[in-house]
Image (cartoon, rainbow, N blue to C red):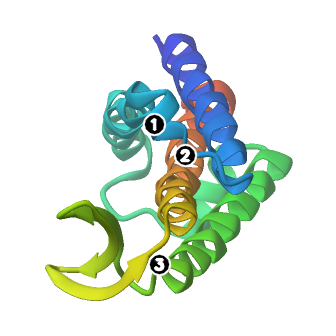
C-alpha cells in the first residue's frame, strides 16, 4: 500500500509540475485542460494517509529533526527546496494578482478582490492572470504531493 500511495503521489507531483511549467509560460492550462483542478482534490488521496501513517510513527507533534530522520538526507533537502520554492512562488503570485482574481463581468475583463473592483483588464492581462492563478495553486501542489511521495517511497519504517 505504501508503494501504491508513493506512486500516486509521484504521479500527482509530475502532473502538477507539468501544469506549473505551462502556467509559468503564461498558458491558461485550466482553459485547455479543465480537469487540471482535480489535482487540487487528488492531494487528499495521498496527504491524508500520510498524516495518519506519520502520526503513528512520529506522534502528533513531530519536530523537524524527527521528520528529517524519517527520510534520507538528499530527499529531505529536495523537500526543503520544494517548500522554499512554493513559498517564493506564492509571494510572486500574490504580488502579480494584487490580491485579486481575474473575472468577467458584463462582458468586461476585470480584476476583483472579494467583490471589489481593483481594475479593468485587457484580454491578454486576463489570460496571463488566469495562468498565474493556476501557477499559484500548482506551486503548493508540488509540495503537497512531494511530501507523501517522499514519505511513502523513502520513509524509514519501524520494525
Which of the pair 136/120 is nearer the observer?
120
Mark 3 vs 1: CB contact within 8 A: no
Q: Residue at x 61, y 42 (%)?
A: 146
Q: Which residue, given by chain and number where applicable, does mark 2 sit on?
A: 28
Quick one: SS at disc 3? helix
The answer to the question of whether label 1 and label 2 lie on touching residues, with beta carbons closer than 8 A, is yes
Establish if 144 lies above or below 46.
below
Q: Secondary structure at mark 1?
A: helix
Task: Give the labeled residue for mark 3.
Answer: 97
- Which element carries disc 2, helix, strand or loop? loop
**Disc 3 vs disc 1: which is toward the camera?**
1
Residue 89 found in image quarter: bottom right
Residue 35: % across, % down: 39, 26
Q: CA distance from mark 2 to mark 3?
A: 15 Å
For residue 54, what is the image quadrant? top left
Q: Residue at x 34, y 27 (%)?
A: 45
Whichever of callouts 2 and 3 sits on the residue coming sooner in the sequence is: 2
Along the line of sight, the residue nearer the viewer: 47 or 126: 126
Farthest front residue in view: 107
Q: Pick out the residue farthest to the right.
A: 74
Q: Using the numbered discs, state the Cα–Cα distance from disc 1 to disc 2 in whole angstroms.
A: 6 Å
x and y percentages locating residue 50 in the rendered image? 41, 37
Neighbourhood count class around disc 1 (C-alpha, 10 Å): few under 14, some 14–19, many 20 upward: few
Closest to the observer, 111 or 44: 111
Residue behind mark 1:
31
User: In this image, 26 relative to 141: left or right?
Assistant: right
Total number of numbered discs in the rendering: 3
Q: What x and y, as percent, mark residue 142?
A: 59, 47
Amino acid at each position: 500500500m505504501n508503494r501504491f500511495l508513493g506512486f500516486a503521489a509521484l504521479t500527482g507531483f509530475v502532473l502538477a509540475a507539468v501544469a506549473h511549467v505551462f502556467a509559468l509560460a503564461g498558458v491558461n492550462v485550466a482553459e485547455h485542460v479543465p480537469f487540471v483542478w482535480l489535482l487540487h482534490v487528488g492531494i487528499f488521496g495521498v496527504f491524508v494517509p500520510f498524516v495518519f501513517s506519520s502520526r503513528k510513527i512520529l506522534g502528533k507533534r513531530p519536530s523537524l529533526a524527527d521528520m528529517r530522520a524519517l527520510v534520507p538526507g538528499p530527499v529531505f533537502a529536495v523537500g526543503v527546496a520544494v517548500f522554499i520554492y512554493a513559498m517564493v512562488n506564492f509571494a510572486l503570485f500574490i504580488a502579480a494578482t494584487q490580491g485579486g482574481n481575474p473575472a468577467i463581468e458584463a462582458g468586461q475583463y476585470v480584476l476583483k478582490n472579494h467583490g471589489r473592483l481593483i481594475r479593468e483588464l485587457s484580454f491578454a492581462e486576463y489570460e496571463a492572470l488566469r495562468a498565474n492563478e493556476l501557477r499559484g495553486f500548482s506551486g503548493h501542489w508540488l509540495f503537497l504531493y512531494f511530501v507523501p511521495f517522499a514519505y511513502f517511497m523513502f520513509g524509514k519504517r519501524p520494525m
